[in-house]
Image: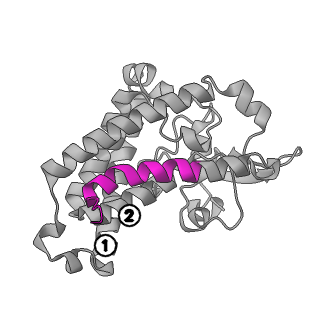
Amino acid sequence: MAMSISDELLGAFVPIVVYWVYSAIYMAFGSLDNFRLHSRKDEQDKNLVSKPNVIKNVLFQQTLQATLAIFLYKVIGNEGGGASESQSNSLTVMARQFITAMFVLDTWQYFVHRYFHHNKFLYRHFHSHHHRLVVPYAFGAIYNHPVEAFVLDITGGALSYYISGMSPRTSIYFFSFATMKSVDDHCGVWLPGNLFHTLFYNNSAYHDVHHHLCGGKYNFSQPFFVMWDIIMGTYMPYSLENRPEGGFQARPIKNNKNHDPYLLAK
């Protein structure tokens, strides 16, 4: 008899597998200096936490994430809003739910992320953990304090799932996609032809500006769009320049009043 794995269980664990597989691909590219946004020396000198500690933190958070995800699937339910399985998993319905979930997740993460920066207590005790990675890399994407992980990521994910009305099966695809996007934003690499860079102005270079020591007041939007930064006046455009020693550099453009944000993020 074939063993059946529930969609809820897959929804809890598939994004974790995607996280490490996609991160491994980027870490391989990160060894190629011509694609890096920072030199390897910068990564070693500027980051305030070791990679083994990052791995331990991420694994702990993913354990917490999977445990709470299984619980939330049971509490929230969402079986396609009462529609049949074929209807709830149709491409049209899934596309609508994806867009709704993306908007909900972006809205939650923008305002909570920004508040974690502006409130000195929250930044000092919680969000500063994430910014110990001044030079971000792929598997450090969700390196956070557990309290922040619960408030920002787990709560935001639960809201996007509940409000969009997606089924557990659709959530497997959505949260795997969101995981890939988060890893991509923190990968520290600029790959020509990367579809995430082509389709989203919120990309690895955009988020790299936020991790700059001078960028903590800008580019709070994550993980998909830049609309809230533009609406709320926290958008910081950048120019992508070649570094003399190889690779690229995302240089913030502070005087951005005369620049079209949709043209500069290229």
Q: Quadrant of residue 149?
A: top left
Q: Residue type at mark 2: give it.
A: Tyr
Q: Is residue 2 shown above or below 62?
A: below
Which quadrant would the C terminus be assigned to in this image? bottom right
Give the image location of residue 134, x and y in percent.
Answer: 62, 32
Residue kind at label 1, given as amino acid type = Met
Q: What residue did someone put label 1 on?
A: 94
Whether label 1 touches label 2, CB < 8 Å: yes
Tell me what residue is drawn at x 53 percent, y 63 percent: 200
Query: Could you give the CA–CA distance between mark 1 and mark 2, rounded to whole angstroms?
Result: 10 Å
The image position of residue 137, as x and y in percent, is 62, 41
Residue 50 in view (yes/no) = yes
Magenta-drawn stretch, dominant element (helix, strand or loop): helix
Residue at 33% across, 35% down: 64
Residue 115 at least partly seen: no
Left or right of residue 219: residue 2 = left
Q: Which residue is mark 2?
A: 173
Q: Is residue 15 magenta?
A: yes
Magenta region: which residues? 1-23
Residue 207 sits above or below residue 260 on the image = above
Q: As drawn, is 29 to the left or to the right of 208?
A: right
Could you tell me which quadrant the N terminus lies in? bottom left
